[in-house]
Image (cartoon, helix red, strand yellow):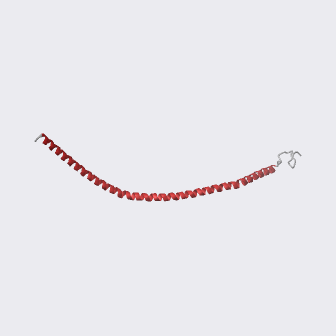
Amino acid sequence: MSAGEIAVLVASIACVGAVIGLLVAVGSLRREVHRLGAVSDELRRQTVPLVADAHRVVDQAATEMERVGAVLDSTESVHATVDSASRLAYRAFANPVVKVLAVRAGAATGLRRLASGSDPAGGAGASPNGKGPR
């Protein structure tokens, strides 16, 4: 055997070893792909019902949000009505109440003066009609 034949033999053995290594790697990859397919099928079986439940819950939440929106609209309407009614009541009763309180205060002052016997005109030198000295 010559040196060239030995080199070809060594190269052939190296190629056969590389092919065997590649076959082992392809077989391992094939098993892993099969396992990955099984895991993805299991994941799909578990997630599809969860996604369906999530869609149902989101639909229910949207319905509830519409109801809450309607309640808030009604509340705003009631608030506006009460606000306008309270302004109207204030305007309607403020002036008469002030007048009644003024009359009451004046009457109370007059009654106190009558009870104490003091001169309602405010001075001893006033005439009976309240216009100047006697």
Instruction: Identify the image quadrant of the N terminus.
Output: top left
Please indicate whether residue 59 sits to the left or right of residue 73 in the image. left
Residue at the spot 24% in from the left edge and 50% down from the top edge:
26
Residue 52 higher or lower than 115, as above or below: below
Residue at (15, 43) in percent of width and height: 8
From this viewpoint, which residue is outermost toward the top?
A: 3
Would residue 36 be found to the left or right of residue 92 on screen? left
Quadrant of the image occupied by residue 3 = top left
Comparing 104 with 27, the one in front is 27
For image coordinates 55% across by 58% down, the residue present is: 71
> In the image, residue 2 lies at what x, y percent?
11, 40
Left-right relation of 69 to 16 = right
Q: How many marks?
A: 0
Residue drawn at 41 percent across, 59 percent down? 52
Locate residue 122, reporting x and y percent.
82, 46
Of residues 37 and 2, the one drawn nearer to the viewer in this rendering: 2
Seen in the picture, residue 11 relative to 60 is either above or below; the reply is: above
Residue 80: percent from left, percent from top: 61, 56
Q: Is residue 13 above or below residue 58?
A: above
Most extreme residue toward the left is 1
Residue 134 in percent (x, y) is at: 89, 46
Hey, which residue is sitting farthest right in the picture? 134
Q: Quadrant of residue 132?
A: top right
